[in-house]
Amino acid sequence: MSFRYIPIEEEKKYALSIDPVYGTAVYSSRVSSRDKQNEEITEAEIESAITSAIWKMFDDERKKFAAKHNISELDVVLTDVRVLYIKLDGAAVQNPIGFKSRTIEVGLVETMVTRDLSEDIENHTPRKGEVSFTLENNSACAWAMKRDSKNKEFIFANVTKEKTYLYHADDKDGLYPLGEIGWGSDRVFEGVASFMQVGADTAKRIVSNYANEEMSQDLKKFFRPSLSGLFEDFFKEMTATSLNVKIKKPLVYVMCEDLTDLETDAISYPRTLPLKIEFLPFVSDKEIVHYEYGKSSIDDCFNRIAKRRMKWLTSNH
């Protein structure tokens, strides 16, 4: 399914969850310099800074999204924007009005979809209730890791049955999609089914038993190198990706619903590999929606400004 509405509380509020095949969320910021640095910041100035940041970020990121989907930039729709933070001269403040500064930095998350999907979303909006915010589940999970982990720069890899979606959390406040690779959990189960000469369902049970220590030591010794070999292509792709984005201390967080029981130590990979890999528990879209709703100031004055300006900008686009 390309999208779904997820209820977030009893008052008929919903989050719109976009499938990464059809949409992208980018976490970034834009900085504007103030001409009158010795004057206090006004509400009108903040509104102008938010508007400018929304447009500049969308103008930059829609080019990449259009190229990925082989569509015109005019067919890229900004479907949601949220203000993550506001910084004055690099320091985060809760309410910048009344302060003085040289610069205003507006941190945003912008979600983009194709025009076709945007029209489909509008045709299926819940009849009762309010759509509070939109997220793309993979990037939201990666942002949660960036926000709560001591490791701020990493690659986040969400492994599905046929593909792996990649995201780069940079060493500042940015989080960007890197695209996808054609390696998925089915590659593991098909490989296990082949070398164990069993059916697909049995192969999944074998992997689960191995991950949960429900296997004899002799069988584990036999099984471990064969299973690890099935990850060889994945490790090569992660190494190449980390080199491309020039991460100083390469770290890859891996999340996969089908392999959620696996832990890092369950897989052997060359210790000469120039990166560290950690498997994470799987997080459902419902779980990340509730987490994001609890962490975000979705209904504060700056986000109300952002929603108004987004509607104005997109209606004139």
Image: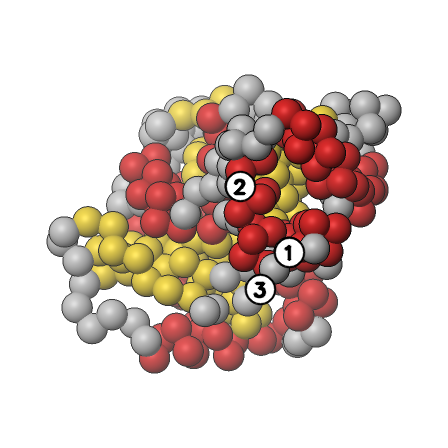
- In percent of width and height, residue 83 lies at 42, 43
**As shown in the figure, which amino acid type bears the numbered disc 3?**
Val
Looking at this view, is 257 or 227 the one in front? 227
From the image, state whether disc 2 or disc 3 is nearer to you: 2
- Residue drawn at x 60%, y 23% is 151
Q: Is residue 302 visible?
A: no
Residue 92 position (above or below residue 210): above
Element under disc 2: helix
Residue 214 lies left or right of residue 66; in this view the side is: left
Dot placed on the residue nearer the N-terminal end, 1 or 3: 3
**Quadrant holding the N terminus:** bottom left
Crowd class of label 1 (few under 14; some 14 to 19; many from 20; radius 10 Å): some
Residue 116 lies left or right of residue 169; in this view the side is: left
Residue of label 2: 208
**As shown in the figure, which amino acid type bears the numbered disc 2?**
Ser
Q: Residue furthest left?
A: 11
- Residue drawn at x 57%, y 32% is 215
Residue 293 position (above or below residue 280): below
Q: Are marks 1 and 3 in contact (CB under 8 Å)?
A: no
Measure the C-alpha gap from mark 2 to mark 3: 28 Å
Looking at this view, is 260 or 213 the one in front? 213
Residue of label 3: 21
Dot placed on the residue nearer the N-terminal end, 2 or 3: 3
Measure the C-alpha gap from mark 1 to mark 2: 15 Å
Q: Are marks 1 and 2 in contact (CB under 8 Å)?
A: no
Q: Is residue 290 visible?
A: yes
- In percent of width and height, residue 104 lies at 51, 34
- Which image quadrant for residue 190? bottom right
Crowd class of label 2 (few under 14; some 14 to 19; many from 20; radius 10 Å): some
Residue 198, label in figure: 1
- In percent of width and height, residue 7 lies at 25, 55
